[in-house]
Image (tube, rainbow, N blue to C red):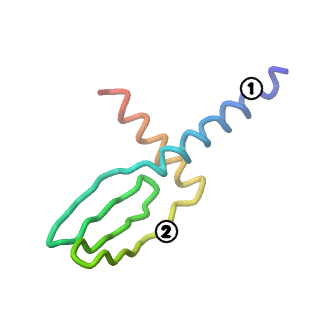
Amino acid sequence: MTQYDKLIERKARELEAEEWGNQVAYIHASNGIMEIALNNGVKSFERIATGEKWTEGKAETKESLFQSFGRWIADQRGK
C-alpha cells in the first residue's frame, strides 16, 4: 500500500491549503469601511454606517493556492 503514500500526502496538503485559504489574512478599517482579506485573495468590504457589503477579487485556483500555502509554510518555519 505504500505506492499511495505520496498521493495521500499531496491530498492532505491540498486540504490544508484550502482550509488556510479560507482563513482571515487581515482586517483593516478606515473611513467607515471595514475590509476583511482572506488568504485566498478574496476581500470583503462593509460600510459601517449603512451596512452595505460587497466583495472584490476571485479565489485563487487550487494549484495557485497550493503554491501560496507552500510559501507561507516555508516562511513560518523560520519563526
Quadrant position of the N terminus in the picture: top right
Residue farthest toward the front in the current orientation of the protein:
50
Quadrant position of the C terminus in the picture: top left
Q: What residue type is labelled 2?
A: Lys
**Residue 16 drawn at (x, y percent):** 56, 39
Q: Mark 1 points at which residue?
A: 5
**Residue 22 drawn at (x, y percent):** 48, 51
Q: Residue 20 carries which label?
A: none
Q: Note whether 77 is above or below 61 in the view shown.
A: above
Q: Residue 58 carries which label?
A: 2
* Mark 2 crowd level (few <14, some 14–19, many ≥20, 10 Å Cα): few
Marks 1 and 2 sit apart, C-alpha to C-alpha, by: 32 Å
Of callouts 1 and 2, the N-terminal one:
1
Tag 2's secondary structure?
loop
Viewed as shown, does residue 58 lie left or right of 38? right
Residue at (52, 60) in percent of width and height: 60
Q: Note whether 22 is above or below 31 in the view shown.
A: above
